[in-house]
Image (tube, rainbow, N blue to C red):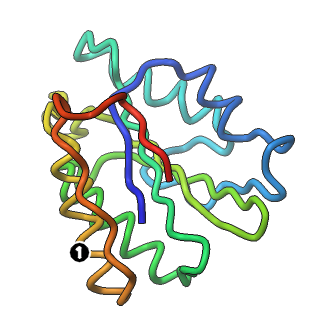
Amino acid sequence: MIIKGGSRKSASFFAKHLMKTEENERVSIAEMKGLYAEDLPEAFRELKALSKATRAENYFYHASINPREDERLTPEHWEFAVDRLEHNLGLDGHARFQVEHEKEGRTHRHIVWSRVDPETLTLANHWRNYEAHDKTRFELEQAFNHEPTPQTPEPALRKSREFAD
């Protein structure tokens, strides 16, 4: 299972990217939580409005959870996986939405959270987010009895920000 993500600000790019049907056989909004929005552009506008209290540029956090081709997650597994990642990133209670993609029979999800804490109006810090990704990956592989994935290298040891599946 691969989990990656980071703090972002390109809402218009992500709204288009997440709903691309040309590259995916199926695209669906799997969840809207803590938002009034009914579509992605509206959800991103809502997240941006909340961020105005912080003056943050990167006001949302985008992550993807990508199981191996032979690993299938039930709706309950997906809920557990996203909740674990949310907790490990320190985003409990933050507004979020999920978009599910299916391509060649393989399903993965994108999750977008507001980085703004709705109670304190402070910004969540993610300077060592790869540790939260690895912790979550390990917890999920244990819980779902999936084959272990190698640990993510420290940022300074990576050849690039992205690594191959």
Identity of the residue drawn at 36% across and 30% down: 161
The image position of residue 12, as x and y in percent, is: 62, 20
**Viewer-proximal residue among 156 and 110:** 156
Identity of the residue drawn at 48% across and 46% down: 164
- Quarter of the figure that contains the N terminus: bottom left
Identity of the residue drawn at 68% across and 67% down: 106
Does 118 sit above or below residue 156? below
Lateral position of residue 54 relative to residue 141, left or right: left
Number of numbered discs: 1
- Residue 121 in view (yes/no): no
**Quadrant of the image occupied by residue 41:** top right
The image position of residue 31, as x and y in percent, is: 56, 59
**Viewer-proximal residue among 123 and 46:** 123
Identify which amino acid the numbered label 1 is placed on.
Answer: Glu
Lateral position of residue 99 relative to residue 125, left or right: right
Does 140 sit above or below residue 10? below
Does 11 sit above or below residue 67? above
Circle 1 is placed at which residue position? 139
Q: What element does badge 1 sit on? A: helix
Identity of the residue drawn at 50% across and 68% down: 67
Does 116 sit above or below residue 79? above
